[in-house]
Every structure is written in structure tokens, then in C-alpha cells.
Image (cartoon, helix red, strand yellow):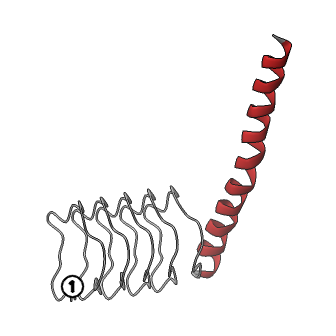
Amino acid sequence: MKINNILAITTILTTIGLAIPVQAAQTEDLVNLLQSNNCPVCNLSGANLSGAHLAGADLRNANLAGANLEGANLEGADLAGANLEGANLTGVFASDASFFLANLNNANVKDAHLVSAELTGANLAGTNVREANLLGVNFR
């Protein structure tokens, strides 16, 4: 019985110990983005960026899976190769933004403003684009 308790406690402590560095890295990446508007290849998965002003941000190859970007300003942002799987982009303003080869699988882009955005090679499987403004979007 004692061995099972020790094993359970060890498992819990190991899990907590492994989670703390990941959360710290995410927090550091988030602070970096909000201060410098520059965060390529960073981990922002699940981040709450609703209403954030990220115009011209460098988010190339960033992990934004499950992030909440509702109403964010991404005008001219570079999200080439970014992972936005399951992200909430409802009402986002992303005209002239690049989503070249980005993963938007199951993302919600409802009511988004994507005028003249670059979506060449983007994965749009399951993406909700209902009522999105896609005027001049490049889907090549």
C-alpha cells in the first residue's frame, strides 16, 4: 500500500514539475509578444489574446493552437507557418496578413475581416468562415 502511495505522489510531483517550465515558457513568450510585437516560433497555445493589438506582429511558425484571438487586430501580421488549429479568430481584423502554409484546421474565423490576406497553402479543413470578409484573399 505504501509503495502505491509513493508511486502516486511521485507521479503527481513529476507532472507538476514538468508543467511549470512549459507554463513559464508560454508566459515568457506572451510577455515578449505583447512588449515587442515579435514572437516567431513561440508557444502561445491556449493564450487569451482577445482584443489584442498585434498589427504587423511577427508570429511566423508560432504555436497558437486553441488560442483566443477574438476581435484582435492582426492587420499586416505575419503568421506564415503558424499553428492556429482550433483557434478562435471571431471578428479578427487581419487585412493584408499572411497565413501562408498556416494550419487553420477547425479554427473559427466567423465575422473576420481578411481582406487581401495571404492564405496560399493554408489548411482550412473544418474552418468556420461564415460571414467573413474574404475580398481579395489569395488562396492559390
Q: Is residue 23 above or below residue 130?
A: above
Name the foreground residue: 72 vs 122.
122
Amino acid type at mark 1: Phe
Residue displayed at 78% across by 18% down:
4
Q: Is residue 125 above or below residue 139?
A: above
Q: Is residue 13 left or right of residue 91?
A: right
Circle 1 SS class: loop
Q: Is residue 92 above or below residue 79?
A: above
Identify the residue position indicated by label 1 in the image.
Answer: 139
Which class describes the residues within 10 Å of circle 1: few (<14), some (14-19), or many (20+)? few
Q: Position of residue 136 (x, y in %)?
A: 17, 89
Q: Position of residue 121 (x, y in %)?
A: 29, 82
Residue displayed at 37% across by 61% down:
70
Q: How many marks?
A: 1
Q: Quadrant of the N terminus?
A: top right
Q: Position of residue 129 (x, y in %)?
A: 19, 66
Name the foreground residue: 38 vs 60.
60
Name the foreground residue: 23 vs 72.
23
Q: Is residue 99 left or right of residue 110?
A: right
Image quadrant of residue 135?
A: bottom left
Name the foreground residue: 57 vs 16.
16
Q: Position of residue 38 (x, y in %)?
A: 59, 82
Residue displayed at 32% across by 75% down:
93
